[in-house]
């Protein structure tokens, strides 16, 4: 299986799930608290240029748009983007959703003030490249916000890939806050600040240990 095969398999998996995804998604079922937590993590007192990598059905992108930011969302799954575009149109948000894998996304260097990666790193064959991309496209002083969890704690609730695809993903079981902090440091970000304490409990079934971290690009 080549890198391209893995990308196509991951994109195809999410396209197949797209029509039913928002029916069980945490960011829909608990939309109010997600808006509160992410809005706090953005720490933005005015509209900013915002990029959501691996936007899926637009969880972070739509929250950012509701807060007045200028938003672009990128994802390799056309099915997920179709859902995101429909929600954005229904809610009157002018989000630019772009069909592109992370590797192929044509995003200009230093073109964003805030970059988000929510539940993305576990799906990637090269997760560090995603953080390096975020670092590249952020302006100095810009902020990356990442959220993920240790999904192996509640396997009965988690999304998963076929075994041959999962074997190629180093973070398929999920990741801890400690590991995420190490990765942000390795990618060149300043020490991260945690925001998950604003959730009254884990927003995921099975009490999955999760985190929301924000870090500045020096």
Image (spheres, rainbow, N blue to C red):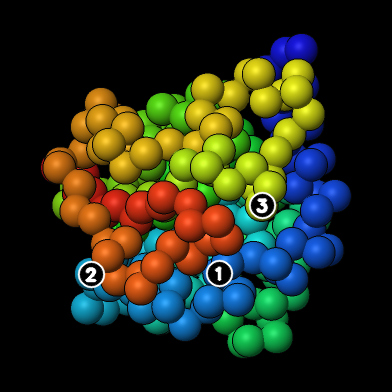
Q: Is residue 96 visible?
A: no
Q: Which quadrant of the figure contains the N terminus?
A: top right
Q: Which mark is residue 43?
A: 2
Say which of 201 and 27 sits in front. Answer: 201
Mark 2, Cα crowd under 10 Å, few <14 / some 14-19 / many 20+, is few
Q: Is residue 137 visible?
A: yes
User: Residue 152, percent across and down?
Assistant: 55, 38
Label 1's element? Answer: helix
Q: Residue at x 57, y 31 (%)?
A: 172
Q: Are marks 3 and 2 in contact (CB under 8 Å)?
A: no
Task: Give how far across and how far down residue 173 sits, in percent.
Answer: 55, 33
Q: Please name the residue shown 70% across and 67% down the image.
A: 24
Q: How much space separates mark 2 and mark 1, taking CA atoms?
A: 19 Å
Q: Label 3, label 2: how many angstroms apart (C-alpha)?
A: 32 Å
The label number, if any, that marks residue 157 in the structure image: 3
- State the residue lying farthest toward the top: 1
Lower sequence index among marks 1 and 3: 1
Q: Which residue is mark 1?
A: 27
Residue located at (37% from left, 39% from top)? 176
Judge the density around disc 1: few (<14), some (14-19), many (≥20) Cα neighbours within 10 Å.
Answer: some
Q: Position of residue 5 (x, y in %)?
A: 77, 21
> Nearer the viewer's eye, disc 3 or disc 2?
3
Front position in the image: 191 or 112: 191
In percent of width and height, residue 169 lies at 59, 24
Disc 2, SS: loop
């Amino acid at each position: 299986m080549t890198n391209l095969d893995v990308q196509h398999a991951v994109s195809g998996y999410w396209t197949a799930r797209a029509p039913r995804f928002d029916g069980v998604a945490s960011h829909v079922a608990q939309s109010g608290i997600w808006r509160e937590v992410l809005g706090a993590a953005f720490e933005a007192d005015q509209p900013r240029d915002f990029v959501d990598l691996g936007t899926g059905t637009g969880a972070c992108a739509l929250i950012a748009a509701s807060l007045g930011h200028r938003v672009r969302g990128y994802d390799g799954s056309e099915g997920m983007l179709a859902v995101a575009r429909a929600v954005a149109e229904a809610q009157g948000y002018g989000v630019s959703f772009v069909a592109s894998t992370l590797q192929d996304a044509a995003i200009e260097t230093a073109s964003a003030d805030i970059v988000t990666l929510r539940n993305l790193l576990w799906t990637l064959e090269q997760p560090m490249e995603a953080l390096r991309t975020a670092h590249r496209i952020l302006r100095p002083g810009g902020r990356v916000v990442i959220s993920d969890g240790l999904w192996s704690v509640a396997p009965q609730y988690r999304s998963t890939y076929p075994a041959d695809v999962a074997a190629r993903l180093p973070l398929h079981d999920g990741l801890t806050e400690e590991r995420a902090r190490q990765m942000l440091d390795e990618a060149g970000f300043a020490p991260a600040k945690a925001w998950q304490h604003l959730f009254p409990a884990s927003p995921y079934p099975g009490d999955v240990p999760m985190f929301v971290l924000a870090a500045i690009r020096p």
